[in-house]
Amino acid sequence: MVDVKQILSQMTTEEKIGQLMQHNANMFIDSSAAVTGDNSNKLGLSQKVINTVGSVLNFCSSVEMRTIQDMHLKNDRNKIPMLFMMDVVHGFRTIFPIPLALGCSFDPNLAARCSEMAADEATAGGVQVTFTPMVDYVRDARWGRVMETCGEEPLLNGMMGAAQIRAFRGKSLSDKTSMATCVKHFAAYGGAEAGRDYNTVELSEHILREYYLPAYKACIDAGADMIMPAFNTLNGIPATVNFWLMKKVLKEEWGFSGIVISDFNAIGDLERHGITNDEKTAARLAFENGCDIEMVSNTYTHCLKELIEKGVFTEEQLDDAVLKVLNLKNNLGMFEDPYHGADIQENSERFLTPEHRATARKAAEECAVLLKNDGILPLSPQVEKIALIGPFADNHEIIGFWSCNGKNEESVTVSEGIHAAAPNTEITVTRGCGNLYDDCDRSGFDAAVKAAAAADVVILCLGEPQNYSGEGNSRADITLTGLQDELAAAVANANKNIVALTFSGRPLALTELEKNVRAILHMWFPGTEGGSAAANLLFGYANPCGKLSMTFPRAVGQCPIYYNHTNTGKPKFFPDDKHQPYASNYIDCPNSPLFPFGHGLSYSNFKYENLELSDDVLYNNSKIEVSVTVKNCSDTVGKETVMLYMRDLFASNSRPVQQLIAFEKAEFAADETKTFKFNITAPMLGFWNNENKFVTEDGVFQISTGCADRLILTENLTFISNAE
Ligand code: GLC
């Protein structure tokens, strides 16, 4: 470790401001040049910028990172190493399932294992800081970035994010396979109106505090080194310069003392938000609201020195921000090793190891969700003829958006997986649809129908393109793209024994498909080992155990649709498929989702019984133990996530009809019975009221277990707040 205060004391104001700037590495040198050694400056950026800039993003390899670092250190008077940051969202070169899929595992330990391996690869690749986890709360499947989060339940989202942070950070940031983390996007980016990316967010404070903020707080408590404000306005003011969010909540209430880094050009975006067209005002607003590092835009470089000279800010305020950056570099051991262990080879041996691939396969198996199964699954490996049909039948593009340095061509396709899992089966592979986008080329239909007619089983591999989710990729229609639904109907006319394997970065409205198939196994974008995981699940070598982290609508018109909704004053009591006048429902669609949050089938058969409370009255300082017995009534080993829900029947605010308050996942041997125990305390029954206070009000609470819309067992408890 070095004495960063001593270094700071020798720095000029310009050099200090340089530490608060983050540039796109591809502005410095041509990344291919880094490999060839021709370090000519591509854009003629002044050497001064390269000498003093504090960090970079969007570089391509450890070789390029070393080149840039060497160029920088050779000329930086203070010999302060740069930081190299990247979005290691679900893997670096070995790609794991997208975070929305990871949420379906309900397994923070799995999330941690994936993050540890991602950190091992990313540090070898020259990365010291990852812009993860993204824990934006989501309720609208139209939003493309739902793929980056662990879903619509704050408790689950926060636990998964915190597990990732602890794993990335390891035992010490100075360890060569540890990385600093940046939780994002603060806050409520997932609340974008109409599910349209970057759109306006208007939310009451108590809703923000109840649903949208907890996961960020869980990540800060887990040690997040940095936080990134969101692009969106929150109640009229862009998050980046939102005093309530950035100063009152983040600093005063939560005491966050880490680094705040703007999102990409977000300070520059203030002009388009209509906040200011003056760079100096933009810089002032951002810095006074606590933004330490400016990503890509240059208002700090252009204006911060003058703002200090004019007394708008003091040198000490600048020093405070710069010291956070120097401390992070020091904690990472960058002054001793400016490469932080980055491999000297571009293609590190730490990439795509058998262990990483095995974990990616296991993760993909645990994150897949068996949405429907009439018993056709698992398939017998002895099945004679399989028709593998659809645009994802032999498609490498299953690693998803934000797949960092992952390569599609390194993924295992469904066809490769199934050929390996069923070597004696005759497998006919045909795409049927021209591609995922085309909505008029039916030329492949005949071959698909013919293959289906001749097969014992059809595996229909459908979905949305992997570039239809992720940043900037919201959709106004969330059905299968192109002619896929039509293909499914045509194939169903030829053979009823259809299993659908679906791929997406968001919940899809699979309503048409569901009518035509006997089973649906949803893979999300499962990553590098997606095809082998799919095959293992289809043939029963692995048993599906995923539970939906986000609701699957019947139609996009239901969005936003989520499990923890309120009852309204005119709830529907007619059968859900019947329109009910003067009730909260649609004329043309049931209220219920196609598949609810928490839904997921298994090849095992789990029976729940004996939900028992240790007492039926809870007081302020007491706790009630809830126990439930679960039996695996099958000869198939399997995992089950047992969930505990509560409903506050009457309160000063209308409360959700269900709210997850605890969960536990366990593996069951054949015919094994397990008893799960959970403790309930008063805060677990609380909520943020209209005065923005967190309260637990006296009253009756329903405690249930099962899945959000199919609760299996329920008992009531009474909370009495003033009795000891
Ligand atoms: C993007 C994203 C953010 C990411 C950053 C750097 O615009 O909003 O999530 O970390 O830029 O790539």
Image: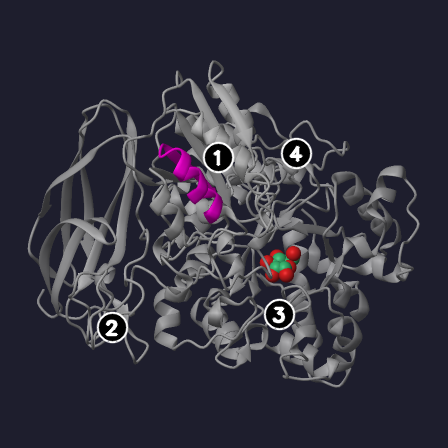
In this picture, which residue range is highlighted in magenta?
Answer: 485-502
Which residue does the numbered mark 1 point to in the structure image? 449
Residue 232's place in the image compared with 413, above or below, is below
Q: Which of marks 4 and 3 is nearer the N terminus?
A: 3
In this rendering, does residue 359 appear at all? no
Q: Which of marks 1 and 2 is nearer the N terminus?
A: 1
Q: Tag 1, which secondary structure? A: helix
In this rendering, does residue 662 appear at all? yes
For residue 501: magenta?
Answer: yes
Q: Which mark is residue 584?
A: 2
Q: Distance between the residues labelled 3 and 2?
A: 44 Å
- Mark in the foreground, 4 or 1: 1
Looking at this rendering, what residue extends furthest in the top direction? 424
Between 573 and 293, the one lying in front of the other is 573
Residue 623's place in the image compared with 451, above or below, is below
Dot 4, crowdedness within 10 Å: few (<14), some or many (≥20)? few
Q: Tag 2, which secondary structure? A: loop
Which residue does the numbered mark 3 point to in the structure image? 291
- Amino acid carrying label 4: it is Glu
User: Which residue lies at the image location 36% right of the left edge and 48% below the top edge?
Assistant: 548
- Mark in the foreground, 1 or 3: 1
Residue 174: percent from left, percent from top: 62, 42
